[in-house]
Image (spheres, rainbow, N blue to C red):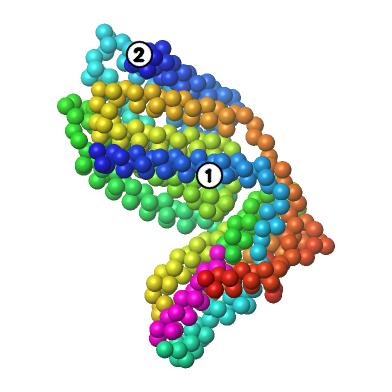
């Protein structure tokens, strides 16, 4: 079952592509493509592009291995750009209603971006080369980009949590899916680039593909299922209790 | 190989953090009863005295250097405690303001937006102030100013008071012990 070109392998590759194209259709009908244009592009690109790569992979009589790797490398490069656009879109949506934090967030994310790109460059320099340069290039690209994307998405989560920013459901869903994919991809590409699994590396493909399938379902849920508004009680601010505060402060000073 | 293991561990930590924050968000959305009950009032005047540079100068002249550093560290820790409470209160006020905004009642929208903005600035200032306090703990002789935190706290207290009064004119609304 856990073999390349088994039924599960075909399902895990094809199902997310089809689901993504269905998601794109629903997004179009609900007008979400205007609200999330970068994510809409991503969904179409992954659905269609993933299908094309799959077709190239399963027809070795027509397309050689080199054609497959060239196509996959090109697909990965375009995917990287679209993913960064989606991260930028999420960032804009998250901070749209918080102008007081926008400047700080931009400074922090720019600084973090520089550090992450620097780290990714160093990691790329220390990569172990493979016999075929395209395989090496793909793995190094995947690992380096995963470092940057995982770092940026983690920053978005931590920043929003620290300031208790309110995520809109679709924005949260997109970011959650990207966060899971980015962290699993980071581990996947790190293991692949390190050649730790050797000929058994196809096992990692199953983990990778299953995770991606789950993330596509997460995007379906958060983008298409109406989310319940939390029960909100009227805001009643309490009277203070200075004695309690002072006792706690004294306790702190006595430590 | 070591590099791959480090990256795998980093990825696992990132995934764990993301999933934990997701669960926390989900639990907060379900159990959103009355976050205001978690607000802890602050004696702004006492805090102002604590960070008064004149007090530090007085202690510096009065105490031997070693003892001054000890007292200064104790004062910095007290400052940090105040700032942490202010930051915690700011977080609660952000949630409360957001809750009011989510109801979409135009009568309170402007006051709620003002509260959220002020509380976010306070939260930002408390974060920076805490970093500076921890740096100052390492170098107790360095000067430290946290006036911006106090000013922002008094401003956010005013915003909360306005929003509270709009929603419930009879309720007493105070975030500071003396305001």
Q: Position of residue B23 (x, y in %)?
A: 56, 41
Residue B21: image tag: 1
Q: Report crowding for label 2: few under 14, some 14 to 19, many 20 or more residues within 10 A (C-alpha).
A: few
Residue A2: image tag: none
Q: Specify start and end residues of the magenta stretch as a single range.
A: B65-84
Q: Secondary structure at mark 2?
A: loop
Q: Is residue B113 visible?
A: no
Looking at this view, name the residue that lies furthest to the top. Answer: A61
Real-space CA distance between mark 2 and mark 1, rounded to the nearest whole angstrom: 37 Å
Q: Which residue occupies the foreground of this view, B81 or A193?
A: B81
Residue A5: image tag: 2
Write the residue at 63% across / 78% down: B45
Write the residue at 18% across / 33% down: A129
Q: Is residue A63 visible?
A: yes
Image quadrant where one finds the C terminus of chain B: bottom right
Q: Secondary structure at mark 1?
A: helix
Residue B160: which quarter of the image? bottom right
| Vertical side of A169 occupied by B169: above or below | below
Looking at this view, name the residue that lies furthest to the front. Answer: A255
| Vertical side of A121 occupied by B46: above or below | below
Q: Position of residue A203 (x, y in %)?
A: 34, 23
């Amino acid at each position: 079952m856990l073999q390349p070109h088994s039924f599960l392998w075909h399902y895990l590759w094809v199902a997310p592509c089809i689901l993504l194209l269905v998601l794109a259709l629903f997004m179009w009908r609900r007008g979400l493509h205007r609200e999330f244009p970068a994510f809409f592009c991503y969904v179409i690109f992954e659905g269609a592009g993933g299908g094309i790569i799959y077709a190239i992979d399963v027809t070795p009589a027509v397309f050689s291995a080199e054609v497959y790797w060239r196509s996959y490398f090109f697909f990965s490069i375009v995917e990287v750009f679209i993913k960064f656009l989606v991260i930028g879109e999420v960032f804009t949506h998250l901070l749209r209603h918080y102008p007081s934090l926008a400047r700080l967030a931009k400074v922090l994310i720019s600084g973090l971006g520089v550090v992450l790109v620097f780290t990714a460059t160093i990691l790329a320099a220390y990569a172990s080369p493979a016999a075929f340069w395209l395989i090496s290039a793909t793995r190094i690209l995947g690992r380096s980009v995963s470092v940057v994307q995982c770092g940026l998405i983690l920053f978005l989560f931590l920043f929003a949590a620290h300031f208790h920013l309110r995520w809109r459901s679709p924005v949260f869903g997109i970011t959650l899916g990207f966060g899971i994919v980015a962290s699993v991809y980071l581990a996947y590409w790190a293991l692949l680039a390190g050649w730790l699994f050797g000929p058994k590396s196809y096992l990692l493909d199953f983990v990778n593909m299953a995770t991606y399938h789950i993330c596509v379902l997460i995007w379906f849920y958060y983008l298409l299922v109406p989310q319940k508004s939390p029960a909100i009680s009227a805001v009643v601010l309490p009277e203070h209790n200075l004695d309690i505060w002072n006792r706690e402060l004294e306790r702190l000073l006595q430590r | 190989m070591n590099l791959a293991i480090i990256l795998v561990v980093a990825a696992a930590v990132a995934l764990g953090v993301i999933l934990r924050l997701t669960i926390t968000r989900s639990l907060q959305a379900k159990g959103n009863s009355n976050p205001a009950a978690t607000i802890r009032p602050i004696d702004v005047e006492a805090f102002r005295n604590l960070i008064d540079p004149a007090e530090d100068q007085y202690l510096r002249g009065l105490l031997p250097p070693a003892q001054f550093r000890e007292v200064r560290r104790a004062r910095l820790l007290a400052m940090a405690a105040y700032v942490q409470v202010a930051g915690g209160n700011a977080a609660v006020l952000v949630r409360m303001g957001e809750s009011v905004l989510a109801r979409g009642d135009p009568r309170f929208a402007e006051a709620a937006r003002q509260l959220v903005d002020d509380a976010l600035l306070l939260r930002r200032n408390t974060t920076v102030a805490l970093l500076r306090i921890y740096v100052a703990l390492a170098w107790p002789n360095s000067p430290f100013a946290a006036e911006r935190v106090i000013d922002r706290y008094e401003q956010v207290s005013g915003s909360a008071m306005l929003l509270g009064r709009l929603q419930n004119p009879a309720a007493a609304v105070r975030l500071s012990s003396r305001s």
